[in-house]
Amino acid sequence: MGLQIGDLTPRRGIKVEELRGKVIAVDAYNALYQFLASIRQPDGTPLMDSEKRITSHLSGLFYRTISLLSEGVKLVWVFDGISNEMKQAEQEKRREARASQEVKFKTALEEEDVDKMRKYRSLGRLTEEMIAESKELLEAMGVAVVQAPAEGEMQAAQLVRERSAYAVASQDYDALAVGGRLIQNLTLAKTRKTVSGMIYISPELLEYEDVLQTLGVNTDQFISLAILVGTDFNPGGVKGIGPKKALALVKEKKFPVRIFGSLEGKVDFDWQAVFQLFKEPEVTKDVRVEFPKLDGEKIMEILVERHEFNEGRVEKQLDKLKEGKGKAAQTTLF
């Protein structure tokens, strides 16, 4: 979900080769949920081992991370910490949506209706075990892992501000609202599978300063704009105000107090608290990003011994990983 400002933000298409030698901070939860949604069997069920443990996320982590490393991109995966209580409404909304999908999926499964199974495939949820195992695999691959105290995308943006990373990789816009540089569609694939079918995709770069300049707003106005149209902390934003109307309002009223003061009776949430979350996000500063040594034996234990991945395929990818690590070793931020 995240901010609903996609139609307003300027962006430019880039090639993965442009990121060679750069450190990219990946919004881990955002990526893992993408893996759960997209890496599926033909009937829509996630990949699983013989004990019915979901492995879609591990498959995505392993194969797609290696693809990017092979292009000389160096990755830091940033994981969420404790979510702010204001985000609970959005989390509850997502839980309800997943529960509804699960019911429809199970009905389609019982009826052996493959088309409906694909349509109502359950996105699943990330368990503590899945998260811990994801970190374990990444570190065995020699990929840096950073634990955020709160929101992962905001911690990732902090790494960019401190020049420990070049950009944040995420489909959400949350990181953009706290400054920095955002890359969407960071993948070597040219198409993405969606519920409505296959769509063409390519990586896109969004520069914070370019966004402010193009929209003609300052930092406080941009945060206000984001809140008006809706964030994870105030889903839905202010009723009746879309992106274009919100942009006109922040330009007219200029200051947050005047912007939200003009909407008396329409704002049913604590806008000041949400504003503060973006203005001064809860992050750890001066994080030392460390890239562990590649541990091939650990990778084999996790994927082959524990989850029954094909040994030959994993070994082949390990060779590719070693080569990719060499390409990514010579890293420059800019």
Image (cartoon, rainbow, N blue to C red):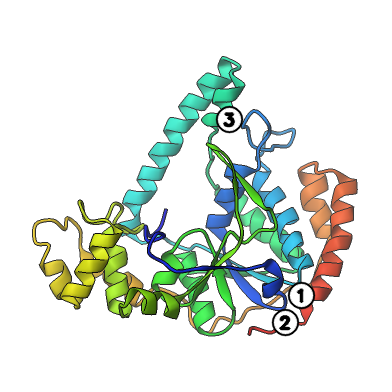
* Number of the label disc, if any, that sits on residue 313: none
> What's the distance in space between the residues labelled 2 and 1, CA to CA?
6 Å
Compared across the picture, whether 11 is left or right of 279 comes to: right
- Pick whichever of labels 3 and 2 is earlier in the sequence: 3
Point 71% across, 48% down: residue: 59
In the rendered structure, are the residues bearing label 2 and label 1 in contact, judged by CB atoms less than 8 Å apart? yes
Q: Residues within 10 Å of mark 2 (few under 14, many from 20)?
A: some
> What's the distance in space between the residues labelled 3 and 2, CA to CA?
41 Å
Point 20% across, 58% down: residue: 269
284 or 201: nearer the viewer: 201
Compared across the picture, whether 316 is left or right of 193 comes to: right
> What's the distance in space between the residues labelled 1 and 3, CA to CA?
37 Å
Q: Secondary structure at mark 1?
A: helix
Q: Where is residue 144 shown, x and y percent of the image?
A: 67, 71
Residue for badge 3? 118
Residue for badge 1? 328
Badge 3 amino acid: Arg
Badge 2 amino acid: Thr
247 or 170: nearer the viewer: 247
* Above or below, comparing residue 236 to residue 181 in the picture: above
Question: Is residue 77 among what the camera can see?
Answer: yes
Point 68% across, 74% down: residue: 18
Q: Where is residue 223 shown, x and y percent of the image?
A: 31, 71
Q: Secondary structure at mark 2?
A: loop
Residue for badge 2? 331
- Pick whichever of labels 1 and 3 is earlier in the sequence: 3
Question: Is residue 150 among what the camera can see?
Answer: no
Q: Secondary structure at mark 3?
A: helix
